[in-house]
Amino acid sequence: MTGASGFIGSALVPALRAAGHQVVRLTRTPQTGEDAVFWDPAQGRLDPAALPGVTAVVHLSGAPADERWTAARKRDIRSSRIESTRLLARTLASMRPAPSVFLSASAVGYYGDRQDDTVDESAPPGSGFLAQVAREWEDAAAPARDAGIRTVHPRFGIVLGRGGGALAKLVPVFEVGAGGKIGHGNQWMSWIARTDVVRALGFLLSAETVHGPANLTAPYPARNAEFAKVLGHVMHRPAVAPVPAFVVRLMYGELADEALLAGQRVLPRVLEQAGFSFEYPHLEGAFRHELGRQ
């Protein structure tokens, strides 16, 4: 697994170990121990001999995309995803025996800004920086696909969990009563509880009929204004302090128009058709569970 210490990986590793799997972490910091293997995507360094017996690979690493996009940040966002995926895919394709499954992360940014349109995995890619990165990110896994490895692209929506992701930024704002919608508030937010992310990734590891993209989003996306209202309700805080669009653009630049003021109404068709059921399909239940406010 790459990204094992990240927001999603740190929850996935113990879940997989509890299910009886041995997890080997790929790390950029040289370490010793049977559960860690060194790699350096920027230098193209990953020794396939260090991965004997690996049957599945989960690739989650990538530079954060939720900070203001400078030219350098955009290069990091792109290279950290594409170079690492390309290296992994080539390495896995060369292994004998090869792993049976490769879960290589992607994101719902693939669809671009779709306004009120409903999209699933059959929708074509959108336009913009995030959509372009997502296309190249998925394309970089081609060597693994071509080698016959079942390759799945979990397209992550907004992952809700305490201590990371969107809620790490939103909860402190709502706690002081300064929360509210962003811009006009009509943009769709395709979200998913981190608990369901962990369950879905475990499901995809063994769902042999699933290939290609799989949206990791709850079945009931919400408009931004509703998202803010429900979060305020769960936290017993007002949600009446909207952030004007021009302020968001001043703070975040290009990121504002591509992510914060744009939206996608994404449905998880592939997961549902494969038989996956969500523990937290509704926003309030997800907030209450992830924030411990039952």
Image (cartoon, rainbow, N blue to C red):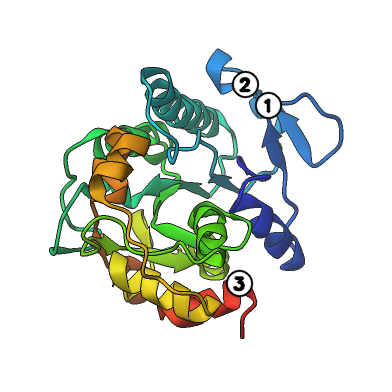
SS for callout 1: loop
Task: Look at the picture and state if 15 lies above or below 257.
Answer: below
Q: Which residue is mark 1?
A: 28
Residue 99 rendering spot, x and y as whole percentages: 56, 44
Q: Quadrant of residue 157?
A: bottom left
Q: Which residue is mark 2?
A: 40
Q: Residue at x 16, y 39 (%)?
A: 127
Residue 209 rendering spot, x and y as whole percentages: 39, 64
> Does residue 43 appear left or right of residue 24 in this picture?
left
Q: Residue at x 41, y 81 (%)?
A: 282
Residue 223 shows in this picture:
no
Task: Look at the picture and state if 191 lies above or below 285.
Answer: above
| Mark 3 crowdedness (10 Å alpha carbons): few <14, some 14-19, many ≥20 | some
Nearer the N terminus, badge 1 or badge 3?
1
Task: Look at the picture and state if 30 lies above or below 9.
Answer: above
Q: Which residue is mark 3?
A: 291
Determine the CA span between mark 1 and mark 3.
Answer: 31 Å
Type of amino acid under label 1: Arg
Residue 293 rendering spot, x and y as whole percentages: 62, 80
Q: Are marks 2 and 1 in contact (CB under 8 Å)?
A: yes
Q: Residue at x 54, y 17 (%)?
A: 42
Type of amino acid under label 3: Leu
The N terminus is located in which quarter?
Answer: top right
Type of amino acid under label 2: Asp
Q: Are marks 1 and 3 in contact (CB under 8 Å)?
A: no
Determine the CA span between mark 2 and mark 1.
Answer: 6 Å
Nearer the N terminus, badge 3 or badge 2?
2
Task: Look at the picture and state if 108 lies above or below 180.
Answer: above
